[in-house]
Amino acid sequence: MRHLIIGASIAGLTAAKRIKEISPQESVILLSGEKVMPYSKMALPYILSTATDFESCNLTHPEGTEILLNKYVERVDPGNKYVYTKDGDKFTYDRLLIATGSSPYIPDVPGSKSSSVVGIRNISDIETVKEKINKSKEKRVILSGAGLVNMEIGDALVKVGIPITYVITSDRVLSQIVDREASKILERTLTSLNVELLKGEEIAEIEENKDFVSVKLESGKLLKGSCVVYGKGVRPNVDFLKDTDVKINRGVVLGNYLETDVPDIYGAGDVTETDDIVFGGKMPHALWPVAVEQGKIAAENMLGMKSFYRGDVLRNILTVFGHTIFTGGISTRDEFDVYRKVSDGEYRKIIVNKGKLKGFVFVGETVESPGAYLKFMKEEVDISNLIVPVLNGALSHIDQYSSLYKVAL
């Protein structure tokens, strides 16, 4: 059987590996739109900060699989089971996996298509930022948006001594994953590091000059820098599916076997939407561990094993500007029963509904076992008698079996 995988990042690689583990004789081909062999996209900010190098971030691929580079897919023909690439190649398949990930959203404003404007997705984007900084008389980098990606990019730039300016549409940083109190803690740190924060602002125009870029904001304020990095969300890479019956909302909508609406086509990773256990309904879960799990389960289903996928929960964990931030579920607002603990530079909040953990925000406080928080939230374990340890970041897997543990002792 011929398994064709579009996308050679972690979801696609994991699926290929799982297929080969279960059925080594199966044919597996991965199509990559990039010109370099697979690498960890999570490492891009660390490459920018020189904490690591590109060669150290290469990902291995399972023996017996074929990875074809620079194969940008333009169209899928499910009726004939063909996949067409931009360079004119045609591939056949018995089972197809969509694992194309997502791309940064760059608004269509004057100058936004210039070479000094990037969204961070690939190693080539990091190379562009470095090149622009090196060649520009204005070293400052202008960051449009203060979400997850741009917070990590900003942190990397500050570590290597590059001044940065955040241009933020909303009135606070990380507004999509933390609440107002948590944002304040982070903003105080940014201010102490001389990071410029322009809130309630939007880029109206970008002009590329010989060795710097000029940026005009909607307020009329003018900025100068080496380049502009957009971090205002992502869009799943689904354009090549537009003439098919594959159901697409924002991403490819999947069932509980990670199947699409079209027979023999499956999905995994950032390009997809799956069930969310806390919020209900379908939504993207653009996370490395989710992509790994989905890649494995999709592979098993491509082999006819009927492996059930229940869904997942939204969460994020990152360390930027000296703060570790861990969020999950309902994290940007107060809802149901809210428990909060605030100390100097640290913040903890959990949200509980009918004894079940529905969300949390931890800033600056190390959580002993992040996996336990996700497990309790996914499995809807009753934490009514564990509020204090949960709020203090001390929840552990053993708490799920505390009564049994006490008897054993």
Image (cartoon, helix red, strand yellow):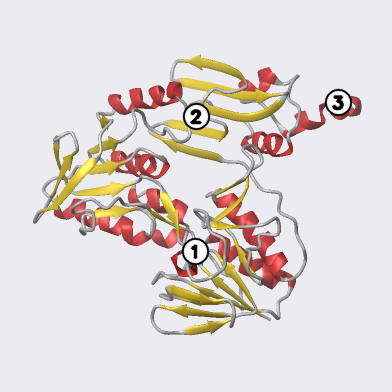
Question: Which amino acid type corresponds to the residue marked 2 in the rendered image?
Answer: Thr
Which residue ends up furthest to the left in the rendered image?
Answer: 210
- The earlier-in-sequence mark between 2 and 3 is 2
From what the image shows, is residue 334 above or below residue 162?
Answer: above
**Which quadrant is home to the N terminus?**
bottom right
The residue carrying mark 2 is 332
Label 2 secondary element = loop
Residue contact between numbered discs 1 and 3, judged by CB atoms under 8 Å: no
Tell me the residue at 44%/78% (across/down): 85
Which of labels 2 and 3 is toward the front? 2
**Which quadrant is home to the C terminus?**
top right
What x and y, as percent, mark residue 359? 60, 30
From what the image shows, is residue 46 above or below residue 58?
Answer: above
From what the image shows, is residue 404 above or below residue 374?
Answer: above
Query: 83 or 117: nearer the eye?
Result: 83
Q: Is residue 186 left or right of residue 316?
A: left
Q: Is residue 393 left or right of residue 239?
A: right
Separation (CA) of disc 2 from disc 1: 29 Å
Tell me the residue at 30%/50% (across/down): 107
Tell me the residue at 35%/37% (across/down): 146
Question: Which amino acid type corresponds to the residue marked 1 in the rendered image?
Answer: Thr
Query: 319 or 229: nearer the eye?
Result: 229
Residue contact between numbered discs 2 and 1, judged by CB atoms under 8 Å: no
Q: Quadrant of residue 135?
A: bottom left
* Count of residue discs: 3
Which of labels 1 and 3 is toward the front? 1
Q: Residues within 10 Å of mark 3 (few under 14, many from 20)?
A: few
- Residue 276, labelled with which disc? none
Question: Which amino acid type corresponds to the residue marked 3 in the rendered image?
Answer: Ser
- Residue 100, labelled with which disc? 1
- The earlier-in-sequence mark between 1 and 3 is 1
